Image (tube, rainbow, N blue to C red):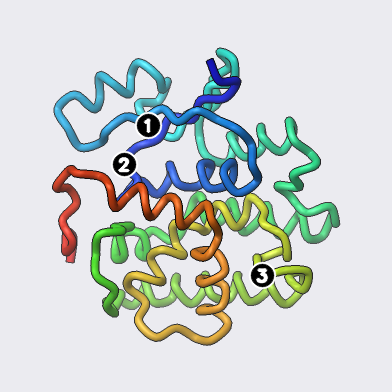
Amino acid sequence: MAEFTLFIGNKCFSSWSLRPWVAMRHLEIPFEEGFVRLRTPETAANLAKVSPTGLVPVLNHNGKIVWETLAILEYLADLFPEKKLWPDDIGARALARSVATEMHSGFREVRYGWPMNLRRPKAHKPLDAEGETQRARIEAIWRQCRTEYGKGGPFLFGHFTAADAMYAPIVTRFDTYGGELAPDTRAYVDAVLSTPAMRHWYAESAKETWPEPGPHEQD
């Protein structure tokens, strides 16, 4: 039995599942993947077997159960300090935790206006006024992190961190719905999407045989 089992939902649309999965995969932390198909009559009962909240993701570490995405990332950061899930510099680390928490609790209009759907053909979809304000805030965050701390590599703090994992699902939304992006936004989106971990997630999503969500669901 693997030391770590990460329980996730459908790769096509389970944005919360993507976050710890891409971090563990990118940073080469070995784990076994547990899967609970979402949006079925059996989903609630199946989730109850592995998750205290009835939600994914959930990390099982030799019987220790950790839920909620940021808690999982913090737990992994404690176990694997050499992976540098948070930056070493205290100012960079404070900023990384701030923007990761902002992502965890915010940007509701972008999430609802641009739902993660890896089946959807790429095409611009306007957001409402509040959604556009939130979209601009996300881009401002990316620019600040890249300008202040990103010179060592293509990610928000140079190397891949928990902050990049937290924004990975939003990256897919910008790519799917955002149309023509500002050059610096496009560069960051492409940097995340080009990682082997993200490419693998997309490939696995394409293999899912279930009809939901359809390519234009929630348009």
Q: Circle 2 — which element?
A: loop
Q: Nearer the viewer, residue 77 or 140?
A: 77
Residue 167: mark: none
Residue under the point 54% across and 86% down: 183
Residue under the point 33% across and 19% down: 48
Residue type for callout 3 = Pro
Q: Circle 1 — which element?
A: loop
What is the spatial separation of the Cα atoms under label 1 and label 2, in whole angstroms?
12 Å
User: Within 10 angstroms of label 2, few (less than 14), some, or many (20 or more) residues?
Assistant: many
Q: Circle 3 — which element?
A: loop
Residue 181 pos. (x, y %): 45, 83
Contact between labelled residues 2 and 3, with CB atoms less than 8 Å apart: no
Residue 55: mark: 1
Residue under the point 52% across and 65% down: 194
| First in sequence: mark 1 vs mark 2 | 2
| First in sequence: mark 3 vs mark 2 | 2
Quadrant where the C terminus sits is bottom left
Image vertical order of residue 72 relative to residue 124, above or below: above
Q: According to the image, label 3 marks what residue?
A: 154
Q: According to the image, label 2 marks what residue?
A: 10
| First in sequence: mark 3 vs mark 1 | 1
Residue 150 pos. (x, y %): 73, 70
Image vertical order of residue 15 relative to residue 6, above or below: below
Residue type for callout 2 = Asn
Q: Nearer the viewer, residue 161 or 119?
A: 119
Tell me where residue 62 sits by quadrant.
top right
What is the spatial separation of the Cα atoms under label 3 and label 1, in whole angstroms?
32 Å
Question: Is label 1 or label 2 in front?
Answer: 2
Q: Nearer the viewer, residue 36 or 199?
A: 199
Contact between labelled residues 1 and 3, with CB atoms less than 8 Å apart: no
Q: Nearer the viewer, residue 208 or 113?
A: 208
Residue 206 pos. (x, y %): 29, 53
